[in-house]
């Protein structure tokens, strides 16, 4: 059941706007619009104004509607459909910012971790930080953001594995976090929001980690994120090594997209890689990507500079907007593109060079929350608001130094507040509580197996592979 949340939404519809901010689902190795069934290609930017330093001071980019409106106005100018946010505070109110994004037709890919204590894994000694408090935080983030239809996906981790030490210590903890998040969805999230991992694109670990997280019946990711900075300046598909990247992943069974791209070693950036990314050279394997990053920070990747809460557009914002503008509105997939089967059996650990592929996952530290859910008053389920303010009081200056006076966000998508039933999808999507060498609960969720509330029975149709897995999971492990 859906109901229109806002008169504005209805107006947009009457005005002949066809787009709706429908939830995105997984289908084979692509994302699809759950209503139209069309493939969804991510065209977006990474967005964390102030970076980690700001998060440490309590900053969360989706809590201040006036700043959100300033930036969403610019997102729209840039022509994007998705942003990625690295850290949020789930105890804050994100309703108006998420509504503004929805009205502008923009989805959110959200990392569940933060740089704060108890909110991320230590990648050399993950066992010291994989705790009940950590679990509460990541489930809290999921609880809040699962209320919004424009939450596209969750990221269980970003570059947790990035050197030999972390490659030895962390892989089975990352898989455990994915497993925990999925168990939480099974019991407490009404729709199957994809859970993925964002990888430091290091050739020492790339192939092994991708395979390790893709496989098995428990703790498998739903998509693979690649942080890639290999196309710098004027280059080609072959010269940049993008051809090798596509080749390496051509038989991967899951959606893949760039969770970060945009090499800044050659300035100005001219964004030739954007053209390649949405062309048939890549669309069979890659579902678009996110440019790093929206705001200018000390590491000099920004498209927009924020000073005293006012925005100044930089030249590379304009050139990126031009590059996005030249990409097809609906990218096409090459006809010969393969559609690998799922589930994928795990290769022998010894073949996964570069990482420790330990298939015994640590026992969950979040069992209590997986069973009972997190506190719904502390982590309030998100809800769209009626009549969000679609303009900003902050100043916006274009790249030529002229102040932009009409800062009204165009309402391009209808957004409705979905009915969010209690309980989760009720099907096993690779969640569980883990064995850690002790007692195993292979069924993936410690809820009653007859718990089938939520939208699970409807949504499950889209996920042929998960149904297959359940069958296998029950046959083999119960
Ligand atoms: C595999 O991981 C489990 C759970 O963290 C741990 O108990 C076990 O010692 C690990 N095995 C190896 C060989 O490292």
Image (cartoon, grey):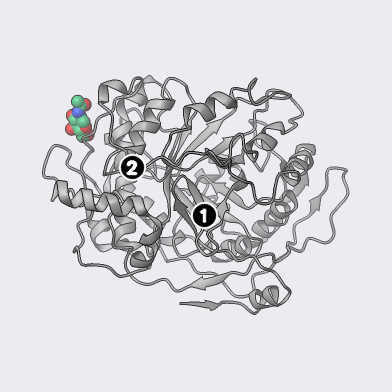
* Rendering quadrant holding ligand 1: top left
Between the residue at mark 1 and the residue at mark 2, the CA separation in whole angstroms equals 20 Å
Q: Position of residue 474 (x, y in %)?
A: 18, 52
Q: From where the camera sits, is residue 298 visible?
A: yes
**Residue 261: x, y in percent?**
60, 34
- Left or right: 176 as drawn, with respect to 200: left
Q: Is residue 129 visible?
A: no
Image spot of residue 227 (x, y percent) = 53, 33
Residue at 23% in and 53% down: 471
Nearer to me, 329 or 296: 329
- Residue at the extreme front: 336
Q: Circle 1 is placed at which residue position?
A: 32
Answer with the quarter of the image where residue 374 lies. bottom left
Q: Quadrant of the N terminus?
A: bottom left
Q: Can you give x and y, in whole percent of width and height, for residue 61 in the image?
A: 58, 52
Q: Secondary structure at mark 1?
A: strand
Q: Residues within 10 Å of mark 1 (few under 14, many from 20)?
A: many
Residue assigned mark 2: 220
Q: Which mark is residue 83?
A: none
Q: Nearer the viewer, mark 1 or mark 2?
A: 1
Q: Earlier in the sequence, mark 1 or mark 2?
A: 1
- Asked if 364 appears above or below 266 in the picture, the reply is below
Report the residue at 26% width, 21% height from top.
350
Instruction: Judge: label 1 CB < 8 Å from ligand 1.
Output: no
Q: In the image, is residue 101 above or below residue 214?
A: below
Q: Residue furthest left?
A: 439
Identity of the residue drawn at 58% across and 48% down: 41
Q: Mark 2 and mark 1 in contact (Cβ < 8 Å)?
A: no
Q: Secondary structure at mark 2?
A: loop
């Amino acid at each position: 059941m859906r109901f229109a949340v806002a008169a504005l939404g209805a107006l947009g519809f009457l005005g002949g706007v066809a787009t709706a901010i429908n939830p995105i689902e997984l289908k084979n190795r692509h994302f699809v619009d759950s209503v139209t069934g069309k493939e969804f290609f991510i065209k977006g930017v990474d967005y964390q104004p102030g970076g980690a330093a700001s998060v440490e001071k309590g900053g969360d980019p989706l809590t201040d509607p006036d700043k959100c409106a300033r930036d969403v106005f610019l997102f729209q100018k840039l022509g994007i459909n998705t942003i990625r946010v690295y850290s949020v505070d789930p105890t804050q109110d994100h309703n108006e910012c998420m509504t503004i994004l929805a009205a502008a037709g923009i989805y959110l890919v959200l990392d569940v971790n933060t740089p704060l204590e108890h909110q991320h894994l230590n990648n050399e000694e993950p066992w010291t930080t994989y705790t009940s408090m950590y679990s509460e935080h990541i489930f809290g983030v999921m609880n809040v953001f699962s209320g919004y239809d424009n939450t596209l996906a969750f990221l269980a981790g970003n570059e947790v594995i990035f050197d030999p030490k972390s490659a030895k210590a962390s892989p089975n903890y990352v898989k455990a976090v994915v497993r925990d998040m999925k168990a939480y969805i099974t019991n407490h999230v009404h729709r199957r929001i994809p859970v993925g991992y964002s990888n430091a694109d290091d050739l020492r670990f790339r192939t092994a980690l991708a395979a390790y997280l893709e496989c098995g019946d428990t703790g498998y990711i739903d998509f693979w994120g690649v942080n890639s900075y290999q196309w710098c300046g004027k280059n080609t598909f072959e010269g940049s090594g993008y051809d090798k990247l596509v080749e390496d992943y051509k038989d991967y069974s899951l959606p893949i997209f760039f969770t970060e791209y945009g090499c800044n070693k050659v300035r100005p950036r001219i964004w030739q890689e954007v053209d390649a990314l949405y062309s048939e050279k890549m669309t069979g394997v890659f579902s678009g990507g996110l440019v790093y990053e929206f705001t200018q920070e000390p590491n000099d990747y920004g498209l927009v500079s924020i000073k005293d809460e006012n925005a100044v557009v930089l030249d590379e914002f304009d050139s990126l907007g031009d590059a996005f503008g030249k990409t097809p509105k609906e990218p096409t997939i090459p006809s010969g593109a393969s559609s690998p089967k799922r589930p994928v059996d795990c290769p022998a650990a010894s073949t996964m060079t570069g990482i420790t592929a330990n298939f015994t996952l640590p026992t969950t530290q979040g069992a209590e929350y997986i069973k009972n859910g997190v506190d719904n008053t502390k982590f309030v389920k998100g809800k769209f608001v009626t009549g969000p303010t679609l303009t900003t009081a902050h100043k916006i200056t274009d790249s030529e130094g002229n102040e932009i006076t009409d800062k009204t966000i165009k309402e391009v998508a209808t957004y409705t507040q979905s009915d969010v039933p209690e309980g989760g999808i009720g099907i096993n999507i690779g969640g569980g509580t883990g064995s850690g060498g002790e007692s195993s609960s292979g069924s993936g969720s410690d809820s009653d197996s007859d718990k089938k509330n939520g939208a699970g029975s409807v949504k499950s149709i889209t996920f042929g592979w998960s149904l297959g897995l359940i069958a296998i999971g029950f046959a083999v492990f119960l």
